[in-house]
Amino acid sequence: SHTSHWHLRARFAALSLSLWLTSLTVVKAQDLDPQQIGHWPGFSQLPPSGIALQGDYAYVAAGSLQIINVSNPTDPQLTSAIDIVVSGSGDQLSAVAVLGDHAYVTTYSSDLYVSDFHVIDISDPANPKKMGRIEAAGQVYDVVVSGDAAYVTKGEFGLQVFDVSDPDNPQPVGAVSTGRYLYRVAIAGSDAYVTSHNSKTEGSGLEVIDIGDKENPRRVGGFDFGAPSTSGHGGDQCQ
């Protein structure tokens, strides 16, 4: 139900609080007084850069894709991990999204300035398997999946849409550039809401993109937060 879904999201709302550290912390955020109730001690590879939740599992991008069982929030346990490798010594995972039996993971090579978009079979969380992969120019900052499409933000390269109806063969089907650097994305209905940064004015904002036709996404509106404040509050770059 909608109510139980809200409680699940609220209960684990703070799973991402420790992404810039090297551990996973579970915080009960259902009340106004969040309290830590569980902790998984750490990742042996790079610091985590992304997290997605589905069912009893947290999918964490941390050097490899780490799948952690959080059915008991007070005692998270590592279920499995799968290495996802691209060419170049500066490789790292950059974002992860989960929908149904698949995880969608992006990797970035700072040496080559290219990203890879990967589809992983997670129908058995204890035995994840690589499926399709496709290269994308530039650095990927975020990925969200809705239906049979994945929406990927790529900074100066805008928003790119991949058709993932065939998990073994994801294909680029559309893209849009708004003249700003695009970072985080959320989907509601036929619109994508994307945080942005204007490199000319140093201002940040929100871009609204119509994705009703995934082959022809188009900007339909936006909001400008303005240039960074000298006090350090408001207008900071949205990443």
Image: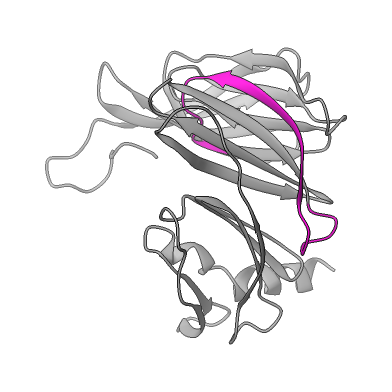
Can the viewer see residue 190 in this picture? Answer: no
The N terminus lies in quadrant: bottom right
Above/below status of 227 relative to 83: above
Toward which corner of the image does residue 131 lie, by quadrant? top right
The C terminus lies in quadrant: top left
Tell me how many marks there are: 0
**Furthest residue to the left?**
230
Query: x, y (%) of residue 185?
Result: 56, 37
**Residue 156 sits inside the magenta stretch:** no
Toward which corner of the image does residue 23 lie, by quadrant? bottom left
Query: x, y (%) of residue 39?
Result: 50, 80
Question: Which residue is at the front of the view, 21 or 227?
Answer: 21
Query: x, y (%) of residue 8?
Result: 69, 72
Question: Which residue is at the front of the view, 188 or 164?
Answer: 164
**Residue 128 sits inside the magenta stretch:** yes
Toward which corner of the image does residue 134 lie, by quadrant? top right
Q: Which residue shows up at 87% across the image and 29% down it?
A: 166
Q: How is the image coloured?
A: one colour
Can the viewer see residue 230 in this picture? Answer: yes
Could you tell whether 128 is left or right of 49 in the image?
right
Q: Which residues are magenta?
A: 122-142
Q: Which residue shows up at 83% across the image and 37% down it?
A: 147
Question: Which residue is at the front of the view, 168 or 173?
Answer: 168
Query: x, y (%) of residue 14?
Result: 50, 69
Above/below status of 207 relative to 147: above
Q: Which residue shows up at 70% across the image and 67% down it?
A: 57
